[in-house]
Image: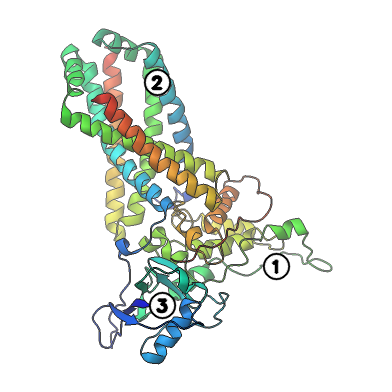
Amino acid sequence: MVRKPRPVFLELARIHMPIGAWTSMGHRVSGVVLAASVLVAVYLLGLSLRDEAGFVQVTTLFGQTTFKSAVVVVVWATFHHVLAGMRHLLSDFGIGSPLRVARRSAWFVNLAGLFLALLAAGVLW
Amino acid sequence: MSKRFTGLKAWWVQRVSAVYMLCFVLFLLVSFALHPLQTYPRWHAWMARPSTSAAFMVFFVALLGHMWVGLRDVLLDYARPAGLRRVLLAAVAFGLLGLVLWLLWILLRLQA
Amino acid sequence: MKLSISRYNPERDVKPYLQDYEIELIPTDHMLLDVLLRLKAQDNTLSFRKSCREGVCGSDAMNINGRNGLACITRTSELREPVVIRPLPGFPIIRDLFVDMTQFFNQYHSVTPYLVAPEPPPARERLQSPAERDKLNGAYECILCACCTSQCPSYWWNPDKFVGPAGLIQAYRFIFDSRDGATQQRLDDLDSDPYRLFRCRTIMNCAEVCPKGLEPVQAIERIRLKIAGMRDQVGGLDVHPPKSPR
């Protein structure tokens, strides 16, 4: 007699996610966003160095709204990824690893990333 | 392939490349702030300098190593079954190699 | 008190569902387990594990309002209503709140959770200084309740390959025990593939929910540093006042 497979409770929306979990999710998402943007960045680098026309094309891109919105997302991704990464590096070596300290640094990373992205949005617009 | 690239080696690559990239980017930002390169001739000349091109290449290798470890982590976590995971890992590896060659071509073209 | 408890009878139900209960609290209903036991008197088909009723056996670990905890030390006065009780996330459900702990215990067994006598044996006792004994603080207190492991996303994605926070804090307890003779083998085993230890992303859900206030994430950090050949840190692991489900 074959027993049917046992169900598992894994409704992520119903499971409590502490602040560190959000930092970690953001770290992963921002990493993937950055990986995709590296492709675009290499293309733009090549274009800007090809000739004068290419250079102008790249500089005018920075004036377009859709591109600017993408840049803001990439700026958020960069700041969050770097700050969360630095938090990881420090805790790897024992700095800031107790839970209470780690919660505060998680809040800092999450908010700083958003704040800096909004700052970039302010600067670009 | 994954057995040889154990957890520890990957962890070191990710950390060391991160530290190098951080230093390099800070250095870049300071340089751009002090010497803005707003015209094509100046941009081209600066990038074509052997020291700049070499430094960029090293940065890019660090970036690709870091990307490889990170994307591999994502695939190791989520990609199933094992066969599909191996295919995806190989695809990412080839993609990253392609990126390195592309950048090498862009930088060498400057010397022409 | 209003509760919504996950029910599942494999012989009758296709999948788990939430059943609503309502019960008048009496003065002795200090902890959630007290309420559950009285509920069972009303509806004796409700199934859950329990034993010591004082937070040391780990049997009644369950997901309470989204957060894993032990029902016997979760105060009823602090709970948001309706209290939603579900089985531990990621573990196969046998019935109602009973989960299959087999894989969890397999991971525990896989880290060789017993001292391996070094050769040759000492002439008399196996001595351990107070400083060496301190290293085990914050790890030996683990009661294997599985609250941490079932709240760890890395464990959810790969329960068969990632040892999990509980297994790893137990691995720490033996790696850093000065009386153990198999330290290098233990470290090699955890680095033998990219899954056993290195799936840990330092998400820290484990430390957040441990009912004993332990921090498996820190144990994992220290094992990683030891694998990398760095000097051991002095003293035991940090312990914090545990936060119950609300």
Secondary structure type for disc 1: loop
Query: Disc 1 to disc 3, how far (Cα)?
Result: 33 Å
Image position of A20 with respect to C100: above or below = above
Q: Is residue B56 above or below residue C56?
A: above
In this rendering, does residue C160 appear at all? no
Same subunit: marks 1 and 3: yes
Residue at 53% in and 59% down = C216
Give the quarter of the figure containing the C terminus of chain C: bottom left
Q: Which residue is mark 3?
A: C100
Q: Which residue is mark 1?
A: C117
- 3D distance between C-alphas at marks 2 and 3: 54 Å
Disc 2 on helix, strand or loop?
A: helix
**Tag 1 and tag 2 share a subunit:** no
Query: C146 above or below A109?
Result: below
Q: Nearer the viewer, mark 1 or mark 3?
A: 3
Which residue occupies 37% across, 25% down?
B57
Characterize the local packing of mark 1: few (<14), some (14-19) or many (20 or more) Cα atoms within 10 angstroms: few
Q: In which quarter of the view is residue A50 placed?
A: top left
Callout 3 amino acid: Asp
Residue bearing the label numbered 2:
B28
> Which disc is residue C188 wearing?
none
Residue A27 drawn at (x, y percent):
37, 44
Question: Given the image, what chain letter belongs to the residue carrying mark 1?
Answer: C
Give the residue at x 25% y 87%. Answer: C12
First reached walking from the N terminus: tag 1 or tag 3: 3
Q: Position of residue C80 (x, y in %)?
A: 39, 68
Amino acid on which the number 2 mark rests in the picture: Leu
x and y, in percent, of residue C83 in the image: 37, 72
